Image (tube, coloured by chain):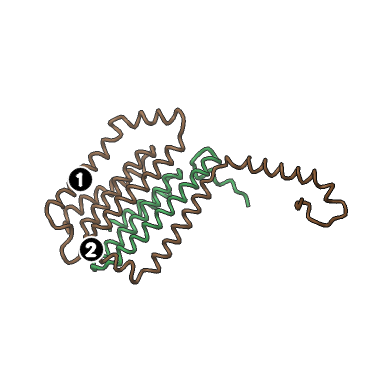
Amino acid sequence: MLAGILFALGVVGLLVRRNLLFILMSIEIMLNAAGLAFITAGARWAQADGQVMFIFILAMAVSEVSVGLALVLQFYHQNRSLDADEASEMRG
Amino acid sequence: MNVTVFYIAAAIAIITTCLVITRKNAVLALLYLAISLISVAVIFYDLGAPFIAALEVIIYAGSIIVLFIFVIMMLNLGKRATVAEQKLLHPRMWIGPTILATILVGEVAYLLARGNAGGTAANVVSPKEVGLTLYGPYLIGVELSSLLLMSALIGTYHLGWHKQPKPETQDVGREYATSVDVGGNTVRVGSSRPSGAT
């Protein structure tokens, strides 16, 4: 339940905000909510699998955030702003 | 598990997450995000996963938040940064996170004072069990996540490569090209060798 609420808040943040930093933060919130769901399930059935999955999610979140922040830096150097709408200049 | 502690920590998590996605100031949003992550860590501790709670605090609230702060500090250099910093030192900015963090510290102190490390004896999963499961049936997952971290490292290094060295390499290339042009006459006479071979 709480994981669902947190995940929904993350989705809302992802959709509403146009700042790249806030979008990354919302992704963090969503990953954290998924991890919370795993931990809760693992505690419910007293299995260690949930925590193992959380460790994997943690590794994934860390690598994702590092690459994402490097991308944000590159984006800022190119566009001098953090607005995600600025990136819509690509014409096919 | 202690139901009261769980509900208080859950309420703090929801409130702070709402505050995160509605703030305008990125540093303030990061403060609230840290409080949200710490409250989720308290929930983990309450659910009987102390090892994961420690990991959450160390990695999420530690390293990821620090990464975000580094990027924010790198982005707004110059005068705007000092103005923003003066605003950050205003008590109105940090009084909210401080109150919420104090509540969380009180909860953890209460749980520790009660003695049993969160959870009833039935559903506490010890770190030893987690380790055995991690390096037993999930060994391939460990290898895959190591691969993921390695690729993330290389990708970040590549993306973080500054544009500074680029003119240098261009200059070197131009020099190389002119030297080939100079030597081109001697090479061109009656030889089929590639001109770069001088």
Question: From what the image shows, is residue B171 above or below residue A8?
Answer: above
Q: Residues within 10 Å of mark 2 (few under 14, many from 20)?
A: some
The spot of residue B37 in percent (x, y) is 30, 49
> Which residue in the structure is indicated by mark 2?
B126
Question: From what the image shows, is residue B88 above or below residue B116?
Answer: above
Residue positioned most to the bottom: B137
**Image point (19%, 49%), residue name:** B108
Front position among marks 1 and 2: 2
Q: Nearer the viewer, residue B39 or A4?
A: B39
Mark 2 belongs to which amino acid?
Answer: Ser
Q: Nearer the viewer, residue B16 or B110?
A: B110
Residue B100 position by quadrant: top left
Residue positioned most to the right: B190
Q: Is residue B100 left or right of residue B83?
A: left
> Which residue in the structure is indicated by mark 1?
B105
The mark nearer the N terminus, 1 or 2, is 1
Mark 1 belongs to which amino acid?
Answer: Val
The spot of residue B177 in percent (x, y) is 74, 45
The picture's colour for chain B is: brown
The picture's colour for chain A is: green
The spot of residue B153 in percent (x, y) is 47, 53
How far apart, in angstroms, are the residues tagged by discs 1 and 2? 23 Å
